[in-house]
Image: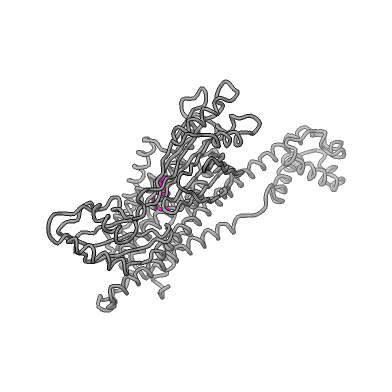
Amino acid sequence: MKHMNMKNWMVVILSGFLQRAILPGINPLGTAYFAAAYRNPADRGILPVITLIGMAVCLPSSILLKYMGILVGLMLMIGILERKKAPVTRTKTLAALVLLILSSNVGYGLALSGISRMYALRHLWTGIFEASGAAVAFLLFGQVMKVFEGPAPKAEETAPFFKPETRERAEEDFVRARLKDMSASFRKLSRMLRDEIPEEKGLSDEDMRDAFDELTACVCENCGRREMCWEKEYDDTYHSTWRLLSLFPGNGPLEKKQVPSGLRRRCVNMDRFLRETNRVMQAAQMNLSWRDRLTENRLAFAGQIGEVAEIIDDLSVELKEREDGSGKLADRLIRKLGRQNIKIKKISVTEESSHSRRQRIYMLARVKRGRCVMTKDLADQISKAAGRRFIPEPGGRSVARRRYTTLSFVEDARYQLIQGTARRTKEGQTVSGDSYAFIYLDSGQVLMSLSDGMGSGQRAKEESEMMIGLLEQMVDTGFGRRSALRMLNSVMLLHGDRQVFSSMDLTVVDLYSGMCEFIKIGASSTFIVRDHKVECVTSGSLPMGAFPEADWEGFTRNLFDGDRIFMVSDGVINRFPDGTGNARIAGLLETMEETNPNGAAGQILAYALEQPGDRADDDMTVLACMICKKPFSVV
């Protein structure tokens, strides 16, 4: 941390005091002040920590995660601009602030209230209102910051003469260091929130004393026999009343026969005494349930902050694990493509150790003479030189021209996946409460997900679709699978006024290595079939939303050419009597000759429907896939 003078400390501390909602659910002043202050490098050392502490103290937990995301987004955007040597101007910072406020209002609002056009418009208008206020405040705070900022250093004094390679390495180290500091700040805040949560469960001694005082004040204060009960027979009355209150948490509403005989004989207002006892204790139990709910919410929020720290750590590790493997392959490509009239000005070959050593090739190249060249033809030449199958990166340029253009190629996967499904809704329902998705990630992995909402019908469908939609969005934007699941569990725990439960069954297939990971959260069985031999993967974990800490079980298997995977919802398993569902389905798969995933899934569903019973008692879904080795995955 750089040396901070008194002006810097004033800027930082003021940021913590400004983090409060001026209207219900919005905090434009706090975010605008943070954006204005963060532009000055001298204020950044402890500014994020003080700002987060101010938010945790002043803002309600329902909007805390939204503004934490805006802070992280601002820090990342400013860090990216600085890494690219671009000036962090007031206009760029203001544009980033407005975009982050709009996107967070819409995205976070829809995550809590549910996805619909009406809610989207409502959250968009709220975001426009808050962004307008934040923009005005940002411009005003920008003028205030000029008082605290010192003179800008001259470029000649601060720009050391590095070689390009040294400068690039220094920039990477700087970004990783900044990410590490941000992660440490979030992790410290998460630990602080967890440490402040009380460990005791049930009614505390203080709760019981408050109930005791309220009961005696309400019933005995103006009673004519007060002197008899609370002076002459004080010990017996005190202990009898205390024992009576202690009976309530385990037995519920009290009856006259539970009152100790001495107190029952002395008290002339016994009926009223019992009524007031039950009322006071019911109020104490209700307060306890609200406190427990708030504790769960606080645990969930602390977990979300911890997940943000983990996500930043993952990003830092990913940056570190990208290794430059140019060397001999780069030289071979320059020579080989040079003979094909392709002039390469710059080339970089990287290996991503987190994805089975998958290689990527970036080159700045042009055609020396003749017509344009398709990148798929270049990929064939690269494959012959590298001994691995390369393809043009999806979304990249498809043609190499006479001017220098950036071309990118990625190593092709060894395997491909063939998928199939079969579904049936519960009898009497028009929609299924089961939702599923096959998500093809840029990393070369396929994520098969199956979610079973609580119950059936439209509500269960909305719950399971929300889970699948949020999961798909998170993994597409780079969240790790386990981090995404923990965040989803927190969303389920904090969703609306009622508690929502939903199972989640994940199968992740790496098309480069053939490794397969199974993650089950309250989910049904999965079957792996190889050469008519069946392995059943089961779990006893609870569904998402049941506890602040997600309860899951994970398994890893190696897959080979021709292996098949079948995922089923509990509606399929429960169709079989006496808990024989897993064994009966495994027996069917051992003798099944059908290799097409669609046909095989249909056979499993038909077999379940043949079981005794006039109608389906639950939604039924079967997902199937077969992994096949590509014929030309290696040249």
The residue closer to the viewer here, 383 or 239, is 383
Residue 172: give x, y in percent of width and height: 36, 68
**What residue do we see at 46% from left, 61% from top?**
313
Q: Is 593 part of what is drawn in magenta?
A: no
Residue 442: give x, y in percent of width and height: 37, 51
The image quarter containing residue 369 is bottom left
Which quarter of the rendered picture does the N terminus lie within?
A: bottom left
Outermost residue toward the left?
A: 370
* Residue 42 in view of the camera: yes
- Image check: 448 left or right of 347? right
- Image check: 192 left or right of 49? right
The residue closer to the viewer here, 533 or 461, is 533
Which quarter of the rendered picture does the C terminus lie within?
A: bottom left
Our reading of the magenta stretch's main secondary structure is helix
- Image check: 528 left or right of 330? right
Residue 342: give x, y in percent of width and height: 19, 61
* Residue 139 in view of the camera: no
**Magenta-colored span:** 472-478
**What residue do we see at 79% from left, 41% from top?**
244
Residue 231: give x, y in percent of width and height: 84, 47
